[in-house]
């Protein structure tokens, strides 16, 4: 049985979120969520999504970096593939298909703060996001794979690439489309091949 057989969207009133709030300072997510608190304060206390304890936190072997949390009014409470949105749906379906357990992955955004535009990051935004990404990476204990999914994720990483590579020479970096960016049949097949490779890398990393 695939580990994702019983996963589903968790609407905002689902009891699942109560368990996530209760575990938000659990040891495997506390360092990330403390960093998120710091980033929140740095931008006038604007809300950022917390790392959901249902995922792997600093123990995860994969850090999946997406674009940004969207507009301020719609920022989710947690990074989680059970969020009620289309990007989370797509990630959940891919993880289901390739039997990737939630604790194997942690999530981040290339630009961690909300943006009121969908335009590409400005150079200073990319650098700001890149510096935050470097801080997040420094907390990871078992990282093997860095997924950069989307233009903003890639731009943030590229803004600090020499520092990132020097600090994490053992981490494999994969660049690809945002989960909702695969529109054509060819792109969707490539997306599936990517997640098949992610599953294989996770398996190889197991003791």
Image (cartoon, rainbow, N blue to C red):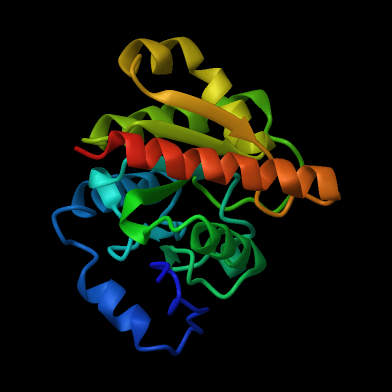
Q: Is residue 110 at least partly visible in the picture?
A: no
Quarter of the N terminus within the rendering = bottom left
Q: Is residue 160 at least partly visible in the picture?
A: yes
Q: Position of residue 131 (x, y in %)?
A: 43, 27
Q: Position of residue 115 (x, y in %)?
A: 63, 50
Q: Position of residue 24 (x, y in %)?
A: 24, 65
User: Residue 20: which quarter of the image?
Assistant: bottom left
The one of 205 and 90 positioned closer to us in this rendering: 205
Quarter of the C terminus within the rendering = top left
User: Residue 102: which quarter of the image?
Assistant: bottom left
Instruction: Kindly give the residue lying farthest to the front in the view shown.
Output: 1
- Horizontally, residue 34 falls left or right of residue 156, namely left
Figure check: 57 above or below 139: below
Figure check: 167 above or below 24: above
* Residue found at x 64% / y 60%: 71
* Residue found at x 24% / y 54%: 29
Figure check: 148 above or below 102: above
């Amino acid at each position: 049985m695939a580990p994702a057989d019983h996963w589903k969207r968790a609407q905002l009133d689902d009891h699942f979120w109560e368990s996530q709030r209760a575990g938000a300072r659990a040891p495997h997510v506390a360092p990330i969520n403390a960093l998120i608190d710091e980033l929140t304060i740095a931008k006038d206390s604007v809300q950022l999504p917390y790392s959901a304890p249902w995922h792997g936190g600093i123990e995860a072997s994969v850090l999946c970096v997406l674009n940004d949390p969207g507009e301020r009014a719609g920022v989710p409470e947690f990074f989680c593939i059970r969020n009620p949105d289309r990007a989370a749906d797509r990630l959940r379906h891919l993880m289901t298909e390739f039997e990737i357990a939630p604790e194997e992955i942690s999530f981040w955004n290339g630009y961690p703060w909300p943006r009121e535009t969908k335009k590409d990051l400005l150079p200073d935004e990319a650098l700001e996001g890149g510096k935050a990404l470097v801080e997040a990476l420094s907390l990871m204990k078992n990282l093997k794979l860095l997924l950069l999914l989307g233009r903003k994720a890639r731009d943030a990483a590229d803004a600090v690439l020499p520092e990132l590579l020097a600090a994490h020479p053992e981490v494999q970096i994969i660049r690809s489309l945002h989960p909702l960016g695969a529109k054509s049949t060819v792109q969707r097949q490539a997306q599936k091949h990517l997640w098949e490779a992610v599953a294989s890398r996770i398996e190889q990393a197991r003791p």
